[in-house]
Amino acid sequence: MKMESSIGARSDIERGYSFAELLIVIALIGLFVLFGGPAMADGFRAYKVRSAATNLATDLRALRYNAVANRAPFTITINNTTNASPNQYSYNNFKGDAITVRLDGVDIETTSAASITFNINGSTGATGNQTVAVSKMINASRNDRYTITVTPTGTISTAYTTF
């Protein structure tokens, strides 16, 4: 014996979604894309500048470590936006291989030194702090900047600003 329930049951012919339900779902997806797309694009640009600054600071720390570990001076050359080969830095790694890193889509805005040399004790030998600023325009009203500072003793720090 087959039991039939009339509450909330659909017949075999009425299964699936109605056209109105599909339109509502498509409209909601459109709203998410409309408002979420620009925010995702801004987030990607902010990630790009943060990633470039983090990579540069990591390479500086590795270079300082190599100078101390190998008891030999190591130098990094930084090209800002005004150089012939802009927005890149180059150095020799611990094996002696020449490494050049180009920061695509990110600007090396200012630098107090075209090169930074770490001595065998990890210091730079400079009389003052050496700074490198990495920046990118995120949108019409926001620009992110990371300032990497190298002290005469070789301490490397980063600071974030937006304007």
Image: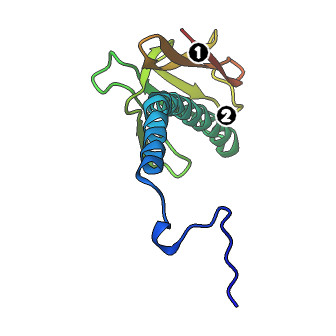
- Amino acid at the residue labelled 1: Gln
Q: Viewer-proximal residue, 104 or 153?
A: 104
Q: Position of residue 155 (x, y in %)?
A: 71, 24
Quadrant containing the N terminus is: bottom right
Q: Position of residue 161 (x, y in %)?
A: 60, 14
Distance CA(mark 2)–CA(mark 1): 18 Å
Coloration of the structure image? rainbow
Q: Residue at x 44, y 47 (%)?
A: 20
Q: Considering only order in the chain, which callout, 1 or 2, is on the residue closer to the N terminus?
A: 2
- Amino acid at the residue labelled 2: Ile
Q: Residue at x 68, y 63 (%)?
A: 7
Give the side of residue 161 with respect to residue 24, left or right.
Answer: right
Q: Which residue is mark 2?
A: 120
Q: Residue at x 65, y 62 (%)?
A: 8
> For the residue labelled by badge 1, is the local secondary structure a helix, a strand or a loop?
strand
Q: Which residue is mark 1?
A: 130
